[in-house]
Image (spheres, coloured by chain):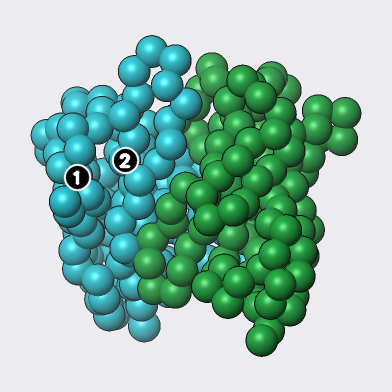
Amino acid sequence: AQSVTQLGSHVSVSEGALVLLRCNYSSSVPPYLFWYVQYPNQGLQLLLKYTSAATLVKGINGFEAEFKKSETSFHLTKPSAHMSDAAEYFCAVTEYYNNNDMRFGAGTRLTVKP
Amino acid sequence: NAGVTQTPKFQVLKTGQSMTLQCAQDMNHNSMYWYRQDPGMGLRLIYYSASEGTTDKGEVPNGYNVSRLNKREFSLRLESAAPSQTSVYFCASSYRAGGDTGELFFGEGSRLTVL
């Protein structure tokens, strides 16, 4: 079955610094990949998704991610962190033939220091 | 615009008690899901319903039952709660038709503690 691995359960950056959250996937067929964000005591909301149309995907709040098949990666980046970016971020994968079964990574908690 | 609504938001049970988590969506979505979230493990799929009248097991279905009552509502039942079922439960829905890639819309979660 498909799966994702998020490297680093906690990432801390200074305000204005680059944000890089890592995600590697495993899939036997071309995957569909997602990044979700969870703010405290809330449900998850979609940041961006890769659906094979373009390898560089732009999302909300200035985030983007690049699909790299050779590295089986889908890392999330933002050039300049803001205090409001502090949250937990989840990478997720689904395979088109069974896309009701979305698998999530363990999550990365992002802390932004003033 | 309510989206996905879950009740209750908090519940404390004793081992062996039963309870039902309710979920309703007002987005006319076809598919609905129940996930559990545990520290360090992300979200794991318990059950899903691809359409009204159908349900299927996910990654961790043991100890749970579900009912797709109608297109709007999808409930999760714990028949005999165990401490291992202490978790935060999320209901989600998606509009799945043709080549849709199934972006999920989540409720705010239900925090369950089993003593």
Task: Measure the C-alpha gap from mark 2 to mark 1.
Answer: 7 Å
Label 1, on which residue? B25
Does residue B16 appear in this view?
yes
Q: Position of residue A76 (x, y in %)?
A: 69, 50
Q: Is residue B62 among what the camera can see?
A: no
The chain letter under disc 2 is B
Residue furthest out toward the bottom? A114
Chain letter, green:
A
Q: What hue does chain B carry in this figure? A: cyan
Q: Amino acid at mark 1?
A: Gln
Q: Left or right: B98 with respect to A11?
A: left
User: Which sits in the foreground, A95 or B46?
Assistant: A95
Q: Position of residue A57 (x, y in %)?
A: 63, 36
Quarter where residue B33 is shown: top left
The residue that disc 2 covers is: B93
Q: Residue at 19% of width from left, 26% of height from top?
A: B53
Q: Report x, y in % for residue B38.
A: 52, 66
Q: Residue at x 22, y 49 (%)?
A: B3
Q: Which mark is residue A4?
A: none
Q: Counting residues from the N terminus, which is met first, the one under dot 2 or under dot 1?
A: 1
- Mark 2 residue type: Ser
Tag 2 and tag 1, C-beta contact below 8 Å: yes
Q: Is A13 left, or right, of A1 in this rendering?
A: right
From the viewer's perspective, tell me whether residue A86 is left or right of residue B16: right
For the C terminus of chain A, the image quarter is bottom right
Indicate whether A95 appears above or below A11: above
Helix, strand, or loop for circle 1?
Answer: strand
Residue toward you, A114 or B31: A114
**Chain ID, mark 1:** B
